[in-house]
Image: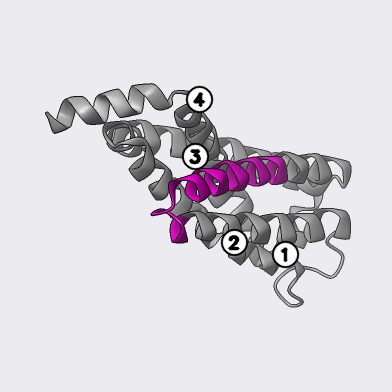
């Protein structure tokens, strides 16, 4: 099997595995929470995206990893992680919290979409070995990040349902 086929198989199966796990364990819990608690849980996961700076860390990735991919991925993840942490730090100031929730989700999703674009442009699937240790991030962590961004936007677009559900369970 080619490197490209293995990488693409890993990536697809990363989504499948996370969707199965998400559907069975994470989604039921998230949808039972009020909107703030659900967004805090998602922000907590994304606050670890500072780790994406490893894409530009010599010795972790190949020096031949295309900078068009590595640099954008590293700083996009870093920015998303910092915005997620700011959301968590401002939870008691609701207007700031919601602004940071929207910001980290917009920045994070744009980062992942542009990373996919850069990876395709650089033919990264055919040269996946250039990722070195960060290969696992791409095929295990990224699918969960994308799924949780989609869920975060779903909750952001349906805030009334979350408030109604929280009120009904509190009564």
Taking 136 as reference, is 139 above or below it?
above
Q: Residue at x 77, y 76 (%)?
A: 58
Gap in angstroms between the C-alphas marked 3 and 1: 22 Å
Whether tag 2 and tag 4 are in contact, CB under 8 A, the answer is no
> Is 56 situated left or right of 9 in this image?
right
Task: Indicate whether 167 appears above or below 101.
Answer: above
Q: Residues within 10 Å of mark 4 (few under 14, many from 20)?
A: few
**Seen in the image, is 90 located left or right of residue 72?**
left
State which region is magenta: 88-112
Q: Crowding near pointer 3: few (<14 within 10 Å), some, many (20+)?
A: many
Q: SS at mark 4?
A: helix
User: Which quarter shows the N terminus?
Assistant: top right
The earlier-in-sequence mark between 3 and 1 is 1
Which residue appears at 52% of the width and 36% of the height?
147
Disc assigned to residue 157: 4
**Disc 3 target residue:** 148
Residue 101 image offset from top left, x and y in percent: 53, 45
Q: Is residue 55 left or right of residue 102?
A: right
The residue at which mark 1 appears reads as 55
| Mark number, residue 82 | 2
Label 2 neighbour load within 10 Å: few <14, some 14-19, many 20+: some
State left or right for residue 57 relative to residue 105: right
Residue ranking furthest to the bottom = 59
Residue at 47% across / 51% down in the picture? 43
Q: Are marks 3 and 1 in contact (CB under 8 Å)?
A: no
Distance (Cα) linking label 2 and label 3: 17 Å
Q: Tell me the distance, in whole angstroms, between the alpha carbons under discs 3 and 4.
A: 14 Å
C-alpha span from label 1 to label 4 = 33 Å
Colouring chosen for the image of the structure: one colour
């Amino acid at each position: 099997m080619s490197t490209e086929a293995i990488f693409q198989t890993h990536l697809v199966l990363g989504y499948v595995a996370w969707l199965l796990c998400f559907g069975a364990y994470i989604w039921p819990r998230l949808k039972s929470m009020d909107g703030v608690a659900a967004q805090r849980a998602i922000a907590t996961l994304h606050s670890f995206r500072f780790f994406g700076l490893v894409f530009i860390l010599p010795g972790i990735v190949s020096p031949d990893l295309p900078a068009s991919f590595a640099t954008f991925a590293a700083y996009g993840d870093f920015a998303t992680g910092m915005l997620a942490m700011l959301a968590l730090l401002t939870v008691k100031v609701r207007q700031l919290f919601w602004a940071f929730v929207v910001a980290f989700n917009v920045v994070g999703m744009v980062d992942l979409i542009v990373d996919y674009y850069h990876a395709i442009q650089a033919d990264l699937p055919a040269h996946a070995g250039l990722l070195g240790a960060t290969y696992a991030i791409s095929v295990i962590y990224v699918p969960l990040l994308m799924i949780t961004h989609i869920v975060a936007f779903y909750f952001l677009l349906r805030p009334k349902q979350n408030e109604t559900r929280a009120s009904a369970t509190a009564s």
